Image (cartoon, rainbow, N blue to C red):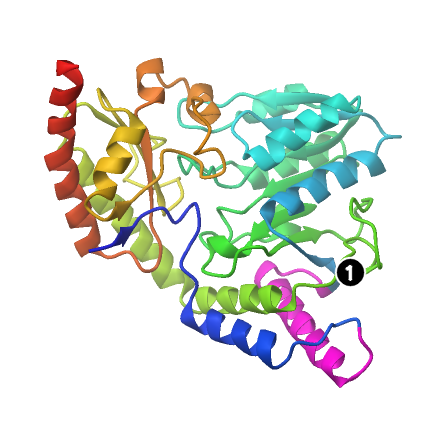
């Protein structure tokens, strides 16, 4: 039995997406920049994809730009806007629990002379709007706050944060990394005051290697990739037509059943959390106190700290039973260092190296969760006894 519960790392591609991509690669394989009919056919896929995402986000088609994924989208937003707004100032704001695509880009910008404020979070992984208010200055060019944390599933008050930023400085841009939230929450940039938004295909059952960046029509941004001038000179390079078409098809399929899927994901989360609580010495990170399991957090992510068992040990013990989970962010999973997110949340040091992440998808079943819980009931006491003997 194979049970995949690492959907925050990547998702299984919908069969319809794979079929469409194969058609584009093998039949409609023209370069969209070409003037002949093959090029026109390819360009139609791009146009249709822009219509799809513009409809989902309630924005203008010209505000959608395709990239190689969430990392490039974040880099384009942060570096492109920081450079474009340097005359306004050289101050940037983000949070301590951002994805490395944002945190490491901010560190790069610090090396280029920008000053960055990293907002702390509370024990549930949420920023304080008061901290954001105090951090704002007349020289603040851009604020970047993720929608959904990829490790613990905490949700940030992005609409409230955007409103505060605009009240304090209308010229400050507001960027949201929505890579984990896109497809699990309704996000409307214009309505919520978001100037730039990043999303990725492989988190929503689309292909890897493709993402998007929403750039509001009034945003000043410089390109960070130069070349043939594709995508209105903002993102040069031959368009990944199969990937873009597959990304759009995945979004269409996901949004066709959005309400039911999100409801079922929350049910899976509540069911799983109730099962995890039967284990002694186990903590579920990020759940809000006094709220039903999952309320106010992402529907698909559960972070669990297990006293006395290292993350890697439990991960491989579950893998022996055909269960695939993560020891944290997949983008940092091979690096032996404590999670910056868990540290920022104040998780005790012994638990920093004893935390694993379960993440669900539309394919996740209760039978799979029952199997996983039983494996944990069997494995964790045994692993603790083994650890004590050593």
Q: Mark yes or no: residue 145 visible.
A: no
The residue stretch that appears in magenta: 34-61
**Image spot of residue 159 (x, y percent):** 58, 41
Residue at the (61%, 43%) spot, across then down: 71
When asked about the image quadrant of residue 23, the answer is: bottom right
Which residue is pictured at 45% across the width and 64% down the height? 254
Up-down relation of residue 226 to residue 102 (above or below): below
Secondary structure, mark 1, is loop
Within the magenta stretch, is there residue 207?
Answer: no
Residue 68: x and y in percent read 63, 53
Residues 31 and 271: in front is 31
Q: Is residue 214 left or right of 301 when viewed as pictured?
A: right
Q: Nearer the viewer, residue 7 or 216?
A: 7
Q: Quadrant of the N terminus?
A: bottom left
Does 165 sit left or right of 159 as displayed? right
Residue at mark 1:
231
Q: Nearer the viewer, residue 379 or 149?
A: 379
Name which residue lies at 55% across and 32% down.
98
Q: Quadrant of residue 227?
A: bottom right
Q: Residue at x 53, y 25 (%)?
A: 128
Quadrant location of the C terminus? top left
The local crowd at label 1, few if under 14, some if 14 to 19, many if 20 or more residues have their Cα within 10 Å, is some
- State whether residue 298 appears in this view: yes
**How far from the left and from the top, in percent, is residue 133?**
64, 23
Q: Quadrant of residue 282?
A: top left
């Amino acid at each position: 039995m194979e049970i995949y519960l690492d959907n925050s790392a990547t998702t299984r591609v919908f069969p319809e997406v794979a079929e469409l991509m194969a058609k584009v690669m093998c039949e409609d394989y023209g370069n969209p920049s070409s003037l002949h009919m093959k090029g026109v056919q390819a360009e139609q896929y791009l146009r249709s994809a822009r219509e799809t995402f513009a409809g989902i986000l309630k924005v203008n088609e010209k505000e959608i730009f395709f990239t190689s994924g969430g990392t490039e989208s974040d880099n384009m937003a942060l570096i492109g806007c920081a450079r474009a707004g340097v005359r306004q100032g050289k101050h940037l704001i983000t949070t301590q629990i951002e994805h490395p695509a944002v945190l490491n880009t901010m560190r790069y910008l610090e090396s280029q002379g920008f000053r960055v404020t990293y907002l702390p979070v509370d024990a549930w992984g949420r920023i304080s709007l008061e901290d954001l208010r105090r951090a704002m200055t007349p020289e603040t060019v851009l604020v970047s706050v993720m929608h959904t944390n990829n490790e613990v599933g905490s949700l940030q008050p992005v609409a409230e944060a955007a409103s505060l930023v605009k009240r304090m400085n209308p010229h400050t841009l507001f960027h949201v990394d929505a890579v984990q939230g896109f497809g699990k929450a309704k996000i409307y940039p214009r309505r919520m005051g978001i100037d730039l938004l990043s999303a990725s295909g492989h988190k929503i059952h689309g292909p890897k290697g493709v993402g998007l960046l929403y750039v509001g029509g009034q945003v000043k941004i410089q390109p960070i990739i130069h070349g043939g001038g594709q995508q209105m000179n903002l993102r040069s390079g031959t368009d990944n037509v199969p990937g873009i078409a597959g990304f759009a098809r995945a979004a269409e399929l996901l949004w066709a059943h959005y309400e039911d899927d999100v409801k079922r994901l929350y049910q899976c989360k509540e069911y799983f959390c109730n099962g995890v609580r039967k284990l002694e010495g186990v903590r579920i990170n990020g759940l809000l106190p006094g709220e039903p399991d999952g309320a106010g957090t992402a529907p698909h992510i559960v972070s669990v700290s297990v006293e006395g068992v290292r993350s890697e040990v439990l991960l491989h013990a579950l893998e022996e039973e055909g269960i695939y989970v993560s020891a944290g962010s997949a983008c940092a999973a091979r690096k032996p260092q404590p999670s910056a997110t868990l540290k920022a949340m104040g998780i005790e040091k012994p638990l920093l190296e004893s935390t694993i992440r379960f993440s669900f998808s539309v394919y996740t079943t209760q039978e799979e969760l029952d199997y996983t819980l039983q494996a944990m009931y069997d494995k964790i006491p045994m692993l603790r006894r083994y650890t004590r003997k050593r």
